[in-house]
Amino acid sequence: MSVLFIVGAVIVLGALSVFGFLVFSRDHEHDCTEPRYLADRRDPMRRWFHGALAVYRGDCGDPGYWDRSCAVHQLSCWSCKQPADVMELINEYQSGETTTAFDKLRIIWLARAAEGAGWMSPEQSWRWCEQAKAALLTTYRDWESVAIDTVAGRAEWYGGDIPDDQRKSTDESLAFAKRHVLPLVPFRG
């Protein structure tokens, strides 16, 4: 009886450990199995934006499909407390705050997060994304040049040098994008 109890306890604890790891180690702000996200992956135009988001943030999915509270929280980290704040930032980046790559990727990010928060319609969000994409395609020859200029823009935004914690995050995002997303997403075409 005690051996069965110990074996059962080990199995239960093992299962709880695996479950806990899976639940608590993943980024709760996204779900890459969300049906709309998966449908977008089959659409070459929308898949392009997943490539852009991956260059900017790595493996975070599409904030347009995040849980509303997560999208609102993320926007609040950008000092956006209401839809007008998002539009103010988008307009600032549209005018050009740093490099074209960094500004346009932030527009894509904000437009998608604003949709996730319910602060922007899907049509409006995708329109902003399309405008940003047009500027990126006009300015850059490939994803590598976008990535290089994104890092330069981020450094400029930080006043010349990216802080170590942000540098690590930037490097991880780009490594993820180069390994898992960009090979499947042509920059042109």
Image: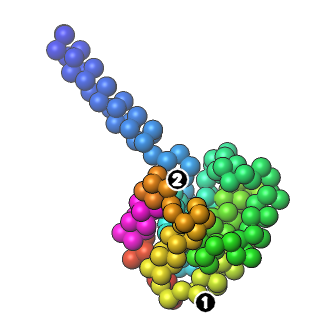
Image quadrant in which the N terminus is located: top left
**Quadrant of the rendered image containing residue 11:** top left
The residue shown at (61%, 58%) is: 63
Q: Is residue 49 left or right of residue 121?
A: left
Determine whether 34 is above or below 6 in the image: below
Q: Is residue 4 shown left or right of residue 50?
A: left
Quickly name the residue at label 2.
Answer: 31
Q: Residues within 10 Å of mark 1 (few under 14, many from 20)?
A: few
Answer whether residue 39 is visible to the viewer in this image.
Answer: no
Q: Which quadrant of the structure image shows residue 98? A: bottom right
Residue 56 lies in the magenta stretch: no
The secondary structure that dominates the magenta segment is: helix
Question: Nearer the N terminus, badge 2 or badge 1?
Answer: 2
| Residue 60 in the image, given as x and y percentages of width and height | 51, 57
Rendered residue at 49%/66% (across/down): 54
Q: Foreground: 179 or 11?
A: 179
Q: Are marks 2 and 1 in contact (CB under 8 Å)?
A: no
Q: Nearer the viewer, residue 115 or 40?
A: 115
Residue displayed at 74% across by 53% down: 80
What is the x, y in percent for residue 12? Answer: 31, 25
Is 6 placed above or below 125 here?
A: above
Q: Position of residue 37 (x, y in %)?
A: 55, 63
- In the displayed structure image, the side of residue 102 where residue 97 appears, left or right: right
The amino acid at mark 2 is Asp
What residue range appears in magenta? 170-179
Q: CA distance from mark 2 to mark 1?
A: 32 Å
In the image, farthest residue toward the top? 1
Disc 2 is placed on an element classified as loop
Q: Is residue 44 above or below residue 24?
A: below
Please identify, in this view, whether the residue under mark 2 or under mark 1 is nearer the observer.
1
Q: Is residue 165 visible?
A: yes
Q: What numbered label is drawn on residue 138? A: 1
